Image (spheres, rainbow, N blue to C red):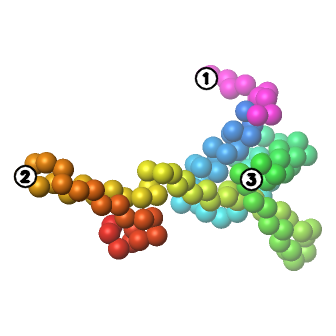
Amino acid sequence: MKRFPKAYSREKRKEQIKLQFKVWIDNGDHEPKTMYRIARALGMTPNTRIYSMLNELVLEGYLTVESRDQSGRWTTKFYYPVVQTLITEKYGRRRIVVKRRGMIADNLEVPSGQMGLWS
């Protein structure tokens, strides 16, 4: 049986946290996660280092934190990934080439605000 290393750098652990959230989302689990659940998913013991890494990811803009009051317990923090949309110049405009007898006759450009009408 192959043994996996337990000691990773801080940046590697942050990448593992991001990847774990991606796995959860790909499996259809979109609920916010507690620090305890994130640590257990990575095979770690929940501690303050994980808490500080999660807070760093919140400051970097990868995660969002939400505090919820739970009856009979302390206020619990739930973490979930920030939905990042990628809009590039490729998707900003749509260019339609009009050909006549095999030759390019004209180019039509549709602005990005009117994409719903053409797609």
The span picked out in magenta is: 1-11
Q: Compared with residue 70, is residue 96 higher up or lower down, i.e. above or below?
A: above
Q: Position of residue 21 (x, y in %)?
A: 64, 51
| Residue neighbourhood size for the residue with mark 3, other residues' Cα within 10 Å, grouped as few (<14), some (14–19), many (≥20) | few
- Which residue occupies 92% across, 68% down? 74
Left or right of 10? Residue 109 is left
Q: Residue furthest bottom?
A: 71
Dot 2 or dot 1: first in sequence order is 1
Q: Which residue is mark 2?
A: 101
Q: Please name the amino acid that badge 1 sits on.
A: Met
Dot 2 or dot 3: first in sequence order is 3
Looking at the rendered structure, the secondary structure element under dot 3 is: loop
- Which residue occupies 33% across, 67% down? 119
Q: Which residue is mark 1?
A: 1
Q: Which secondary structure is most common in the magenta stretch?
A: loop
Mark 3 vs mark 1: give the one in front. 3
- Which residue occupies 70% across, 44% down? 17
Q: CA distance from mark 3 to mark 1?
A: 38 Å
Q: Nearer the viewer, residue 69 or 44?
A: 69
Check whether the beta carbons of the residues at disc 3 and disc 1 lie within 8 A of each other. no
